[in-house]
Amino acid sequence: MKVCPVCGGTNIESDIIDSCRDCFWEEDIYSEEFPDIGGGVNMISLNEARRRWKRKTGTDVEKEEAH
């Protein structure tokens, strides 16, 4: 299992597509390297997805990772 870069869930695993069951982010190496650029399979940037997740849940994944 891998940690989702958007919501912090440890549930990214699949035989075909690696996607998070909580926020539906699909693993994308390009987005992790260039988090402010949208496009690709997720359509929005990684940082935009994080902002939307934070607004939706009140959870800030980046601050939680720092602890």
Image (cartoon, rainbow, N blue to C red):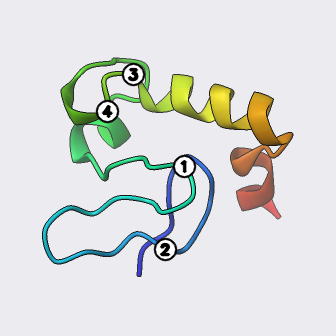
Look at label 2 and name its amino acid: Asn
Q: Residues within 10 Å of mark 4 (few under 14, many from 20)?
A: some
Query: Measured along the vertical axis of the image, is residue 56 above or below residue 62?
Result: above
Cα–Cα span, label 1 and label 2: 10 Å
Q: Which structural element holds mark 4?
A: helix
Per the image, label 3 sits on a secondary structure element best described as loop
Q: Would you name the residue on which mark 1 appears?
A: 23
Relative placement, left or right, of 52 versus 5 is right
Circle 1 or circle 3, nearest the eye: 1
Instruction: Specify the amino acid type for callout 1.
Output: Cys
Task: Describe the element under mark 2 as helix, strand or loop.
Answer: loop
Q: Which mark is residue 44?
A: 3
Q: Considering only order in the chain, which callout, 3 or 1, is on the residue closer to the N terminus?
A: 1
Residue bearing mark 2: 11
- Residue in view at x 16 percent, y 77 percent: 15
x, y percent for residue 64: 79, 57
- Residue occupied by mark 4: 42
User: Is tag 4's residue or tag 1's residue first in the polypeptide sequence?
Assistant: 1
Q: What is the x, y in percent for residue 52? A: 65, 27
Q: CA distance from mark 4 to mark 3?
A: 6 Å
- Tag count in the figure? 4
Element type at mark 1: loop
**Up-down relation of residue 44 to residue 17 (above or below):** above
The numbered mark, 4 or 2, whose residue comes first in the sequence reads 2
